[in-house]
Image (cartoon, helix red, strand yellow):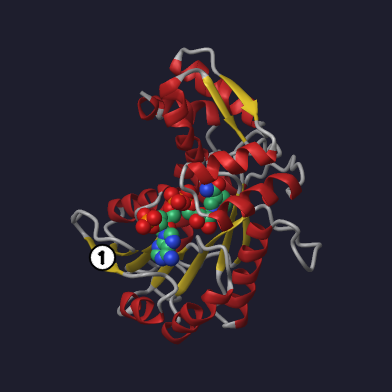
Amino acid sequence: MPDSTRPAGPRPPSSVLVTGAAGNLGREVVDRLRAHGVRVRSLVRHQTPPRAGVESVVGDLTDPAAVREALVGIDAVFLIWPLLDSASAHAPVAELAAAAPRVVYLSTTAIDDGAARQSDPIAQVHMDVEVLLHEADLRPVVLRSDTLASNARGWASQLRMGDVVSGLDIARTAVVDERDVADAAVAVLLAHRPDQGVHVLTGPEVLSRAEQVAHLGSALRRRLRFQALPADLARSRMLADGRPEPLVEALIAASVRRPESNRVTDHIERLTGRPAGTFAQWAVDHAADFN
Ligand SMILES: NC(=O)c1ccc[n+]([C@@H]2O[C@H](COP(=O)([O-])OP(=O)(O)OC[C@H]3O[C@@H](n4cnc5c(N)ncnc54)[C@H](OP(=O)(O)O)[C@@H]3O)[C@@H](O)[C@H]2O)c1
């Protein structure tokens, strides 16, 4: 029987393509879509173990043929752009425009709308991709996310060696739980009529790295501390860890140029119906990842 309380309009998507599906955020998005009974296709660079209800296409986001194949029969796309250049986004965005699915793009709160050029190179790439999607007439829903709590997993190896986390000291941000971002993404992916435009997704409090490390210490019942490294030392450590040089330079530029942000929004709650979780709770829930 039809639901007479529902406004008439296009049906919510029933098949969704998830890019970055093997990543910290993408995994959470896939899990939630499956829980909603949605047909999920993932675009991954390497074959992953099969998962019930998830079909995968192996390919690179910059490869238009792989993107075209991944889009066949798809109603909506959860799009990330994990690359450091936006020039390679033109061809895949053209494929998206040809297939015309609903597009939910995961961008960053680091974008300064008042600046024509972003001083932070990572923000510039996200801004370029947002513009490309608009110019392609895809009318994307843009989710600008603050720093994901899951980035803290990168500290696990240091914490197996001792009680100090050392690294670049980036400006304080309203760290957001990736599970909340995934809930928000799924809400707009599956909405009957998603609110197009920009949603700014933050956690409930602005935290420095030292404060995050302290919260993690409480969750692990250890006295942990953060040690800020000068850029030169952080650069040589990251290169020695095998991180690609362009990424290292972009991270250093972002750490130096990204301004302090005190912005906390309620957009997670508006999209999901629940307030955003704290980093302290994220740390409790993920304590086992640091053993
Ligand atoms: N982390 C943050 O604080 C933050 C904040 C705002 C926005 N974002 C955006 O959100 C995205 C997802 O974040 P995350 O923490 O989930 O990242 P993540 O864990 O590093 O996952 C990124 C995923 O993208 C895949 N990938 C990388 N390059 C690709 C390519 N050329 N073609 C196809 N797939 C590719 C990776 O595949 P492999 O598994 O093969 O490496 C990985 O699965 C970021 O890339 C960034 O654009 C992140």
Left or right of 58? Residue 199 is right
Q: Which residue is drawn at 41% across and 70% down?
A: 76
Left or right of 86? Residue 46 is left
- Can residue 114 be seen from the camera position used here? yes
Is the residue 133 above or below the residue 289 in the image? below
Q: Which residue is drawn at 37% across and 74% down?
A: 75
- Relative to the observer, which residue lies in front, 107 or 85? 85
Is the residue 228 above or below the residue 93 in the image? above
- Relative to the observer, which residue lies in front, 156 or 231? 231
- Name the spot of residue 14 as percent of width and height, x first: 32, 68
- Relative to the observer, which residue lies in front, 36 or 227? 227
Q: Residue furthest bottom?
A: 98
How many other residues sit within 10 Å of disc 1, few (<14), some (14-19) or many (≥20)?
many
Q: Quadrant for the C terminus, please.
A: top left
Left or right of 182? Residue 134 is right
Classify residue 171 by image quadrant: top right
- Name the spot of residue 169 as percent of width and height, x first: 67, 35
Classify residue 142 by image quadrant: bottom right
- Name the spot of residue 123 as percent of width and height, x first: 66, 59
Q: Which residue is drawn at 45% across and 81% down?
A: 100
Mark 1 close to ligand 1, CB under 8 Å: no
- Name the spot of residue 77 as percent of width and height, x first: 42, 68
Amino acid at the residue labelled 1: Ser
Circle 1 is placed at which residue position?
A: 56
Q: Residue at x 58, y 58 (%)?
A: 246
Q: Quadrant for the N terminus, please.
A: bottom left
Query: Mark 1: which secondary structure?
Result: strand
- Can residue 190 be seen from the camera position used here? no
